[in-house]
Amino acid sequence: MSREKKKPRNLREALKGKLSKREFGYLVKSFDSVGNIAVIEIPPELEKKEKIIGEALIEINPRFETVCKIAGAHKGAFRVQPVKVIAGKRNKTALYIESGCRMKVDLGKVFFSPRLSHERERIGKLIKKGEVVGAFFAGVGPFPLVFAKNSPMKKAVAIELNPHAVKLMRENIVLNKVQEKIEPVLGDVNKLASTTFKGKFDRAVMPLPKDAGGFLEATMLSIKPSGGIIHFYQFSPIDDPFTGPLKKIRETAAKLGLKTRVLRKKMVRSFSAQTIQVVLDFKVKRA
Ligand SMILES: C[S@@+](CC[C@H](N)C(=O)[O-])C[C@H]1O[C@@H](n2cnc3c(N)ncnc32)[C@H](O)[C@@H]1O
């Protein structure tokens, strides 16, 4: 009777006999999957075992060709997080698929997170026929691409400050054949939304949870005078997630003489022990 080696069902099983009990205690329970590349956190206590951990991830999930470890925090205006290849092919360009859109993502050179995919899908379903959407802080284009393929919008203007992300966004627009639907723009949301795009949008999306408050005035100005909707993402304290963002919305609207009405307050995902990411959908129009 042949004794075939059974395929491990998860990372822990794949690492059985390769990590000590103490080392298992440091192993994280989840990792991000960006198409053909997995991104995992390796605590300092497991650094010597990182190659073994990466190879085990590929063993249980053969669609991963590369495993990277997080090599630092998100930093700077571009919110880029350094990563290092620990197993598989030495390639940091992922091909990621979401809601029927294919996207090239250069890990370590642009911000990208698969964790907001449900938000992109949710907002895509809210967009009405003919809307013109401001897709701010667009990165390599996940929000506008999902809208272009899954909503009846007229078009999105996708503004992004990181030139490398804009280059990839242009490639992704062609890859998905949505050149008619997305206008990629390299630049600063604060400058462009309050000038070139003043009064132009039916809806604006603001996925910059750390700093979005500083862009709220320009974003409100970018909405058509007849009114529109803003999706405002923020990091908030877990015990009182909505007071801060609501105050910011009311103060900014009062300063501009605008009226707002909150349509939805939602906890999006936990970020750390004390912090969660929230989104507030609100209507804004002339008072
Ligand atoms: C949190 S990331 C979101 C990227 C993308 N929407 C996604 O979900 O993958 C924020 C993005 O905003 C860009 N950014 C930061 N400040 C900006 C500004 N003043 N104007 C335009 N884009 C900016 C960063 O380069 C980064 O790509």
Image (cartoon, helix red, strand yellow):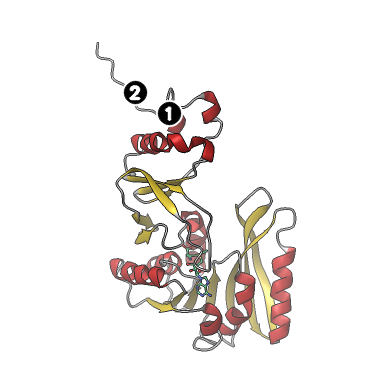
Q: Which type of secondary structure does the marked residue at label 1 adopt? A: loop
Indicate the amino acid at tag 2: Lys
According to the picture, the residue beneath numbered tag 2 turns out to be 6
In the image, residue 75 sits, relative to residue 17, either above or below, namely: below
The residue most toward the left is 1
Query: What is the CA distance from the residue labelled 1 to the residue labelled 2?
Result: 13 Å
According to the picture, the residue beneath numbered tag 1 turns out to be 15
Residue 236 x %, y % = 68, 59
Q: Is residue 154 visible?
A: no
Query: Which of the image's four quarters has the N terminus?
Result: top left
- Residue at (68% x, 86% y) in the render: 256
Mark 2 Cα-neighbour bin, 10 Å: few <14, some 14–19, many ≥20? few
- From the viewer's perspective, is 232 left or right of 36? right
- From the viewer's perspective, is 96 left or right of 197? left
Residue 39 x %, y % = 43, 47
Task: Name the quadrant containing residue 190.
Answer: bottom right
